Amino acid sequence: MERSSFTIDLGAVRRNAGTLKRAAGAAELWAVVKAEGYGHGAVDVSRAALDGGATALCVATVPEALHVRTALREARIVVMGPVGEHEVAEARAARLELVAADGRIPEGLPVHLKLDTGMGRWGLSELPAPTRDVVGIMSHLASAESDPGFSAAQIERFRSATDGVGKLTRHLANSAGTLRYPEARLDAVRCGIALYGISPFGGDPADDGLEPVLSWDSYLALVKRLAPGESTGYGRRFVADEPTWIGIVPVGYADGFRRDMTGTEVAVAGRRCRVVGTISMDALAVELPETLAPGTPVTLVGDGVLIEEHARVAGTIGYEIATGLNTRSRRAQRLVRDG
């Protein structure tokens, strides 16, 4: 028996792409598939997103782009992160599009100029005169999920700076911007986290018509009864104050179930159970309502157990939980279905 298994639902990717495309209105949908498709599998997600209406793929690095290019020979691929001089020739040969954010504009391939409107990272303080290779102008919203006032200021800065650019493609909105700010949609939107059915706002993705793409399942490998005063796990962080049944699940932080997710809930045979004690590298403990048989199924993500819930307990965001899952390791089986 596998210790755990991840299932990627490509049908959900396509449906999420359709939802985002409708939200984008007249703008094109560009799918962000960096970080191995947020841990979901960049090539599989790319195909499904294109099938669902996306017209381009966005990655962070040239190696990520080359990985996708080997499977999708004709896809439009935009590299959004910084690119070294030694990578430009590779990018040109692979028909990639690059982003210029520091004043250097590569030649001989399509380029997007990135304007810093308030993110305070990559980006130009003002736009140079476009060269013949420039095809687009972009920026990045810093807090579209939480700060409408600052987002509105960024949108206005970008629109003012890019008025009259002619046929160049303007793109600014991320997932949160696409779902909340019609004025940010412009010519194209770049959606990442929402494509995977994870809410950019940290709430229930269903509120925006999104479906979680990834599910993660395991089982109870051991069930035991703690007497009052007995504990489970390192540091004795959970000590029973009454007779307590616990189940041990063969998944831990090496698989991406983080130590700071103690206190979150998973589903054991469909019932919510609390994760207790210190999460180990290879195991975690859940408090059970009664004795259950070893082999009882445990849902770590999926069927209503949301990544967003785990993120709240861990004090982080769904992006970090998703990209930290060890979905391509030999520690777990990875299944792809086309539902």
Image (spheres, grey):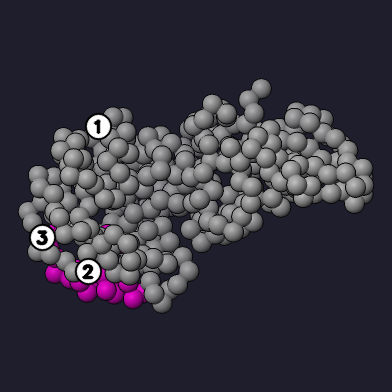
* Vertical comparison of 297 with 145: above or below: above
Question: Which numbered marker is on residue 73?
Answer: 1
* Vertical comparison of 7 with 27: above or below: above
Q: Quadrant of residue 293?
A: top right
| Secondary structure beneath label 2 | loop
The location of residue 330, given as percent across then percent down, is 54, 26
Question: Which numbered marker is on residue 9?
Answer: none
Amino acid at circle 2: Ser
* Tags 1 and 2 touching, CB below 8 Å: no
**Residue named by callout 2:** 125
**Marked residue nearer the N-terminal end (1 or 2):** 1
Name the foreground residue: 222 vs 153.
222
Query: Magenta segment, which residues?
Result: 152-172
* Residue at x-position 18% and y-position 40%: 86
The location of residue 7, given as percent across then percent down, is 55, 34
CA–CA distance in space, label 1 to label 2? 35 Å
Mark 1 or 2, which is nearer the eye?
2
